[in-house]
Amino acid sequence: MMNFIKDPAAIEQRSMEIIAPYLNKLNLTAEEVKVYSRIIHAAGDPEYAGIIRIHEKAIASGRQALRHGCNVFCDVEMVRTGINKRVLMNFGGEALCLIADETVATEAKKQGITRSMAAIRTFGEKMNGAVVAIGNAPTALFELITLMEQTGIRPALIVGVPVGFVGASESKQLLTEVSPVPYITVSGNKGGSPIAAAAINALLYMGA
């Protein structure tokens, strides 16, 4: 039988050791290394090292908000599920998602928009000073950007990493160009719920 590492802590430590060389030449801060490493670990893809984009104030702003008990508003249940809710709860925060809410579903159908867009609209001003994690739906990220422009909503941090071939790359590019608040994103079509959750967890594991 093949020998393999069985201890979870040892597996994680070895994973981070394997990831480290991909980050050595990127001139990252110690905190940025932790975020990059978590994302790459979640994706199993070192190519992420070249496409992660972190606003210069993102980590500080996100950590401060989480440390003070802010909620994390998620576009889909997969993001909410992936966040370490025990650690988040220790700070006083909660991970929230409305994608399956019947009222949101009805409103989405009535307006002819996606459920994720309707959910973001429903969150509304509750997102002020909070963290927003979008890992699946480009329409949710577009909607959030629109709300910030039109209503002045200001999250403390946006983790915007929707995945796919229709609108994903464009929504993330727009985020980097016009966002009035700090962000963590990745360029191109890659991303996804595990990536969004990994970025949030990286901040939580720093002690927020």
Image (cartoon, helix red, strand yellow):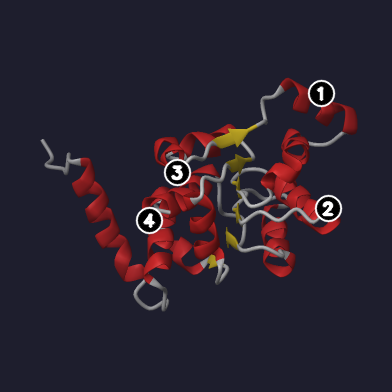
Where is residue 71 drawn, in percent x and y?
57, 42
Marking on residue 206: 4
Q: Amino acid at mark 3?
A: Phe
- The reply to whether dot 1 and dot 3 touch (C-beta < 8 Å) is no
Comparing 39 with 47, the one in front is 39
Identify the element where label 2 is drawn.
helix
Identity of the residue drawn at 43% across and 48% down: 201
The quadrant of the image that shows the N terminus is: top left
Q: Amino acid at mark 2?
A: Thr
Labelled disc at residue 91 = 3
Q: Estimate the spatial distance between the alpha carbons at disc 4 and disc 1, rounded to whole Å.
A: 39 Å
Which of discs 1 and 3 lies nearer the camera? The answer is 3
Residue at image location 43% in from the left, 54% down from the top: 208
Mark 3 / mark 4, whichever is N-terminal: 3
Q: Which residue is mark 1?
A: 106
Q: Is 104 displayed left or right of 8 in the figure?
A: right
Q: Are marks 4 and 1 in contact (CB under 8 Å)?
A: no
Label 2 to label 3: alpha-carbon separation:
28 Å
Percent across and percent down for residue 90 are: 41, 39
* Residue 173 picture location, percent across and down: 69, 64
Q: Which residue is mark 2?
A: 151
- Gap between marks 1 and 2, in whole Å? 23 Å
Q: Amino acid at mark 4?
A: Met
Which corner quadrant of the image does residue 99 belong to? top right
Of 2 and 22, the residue lying toward us: 22
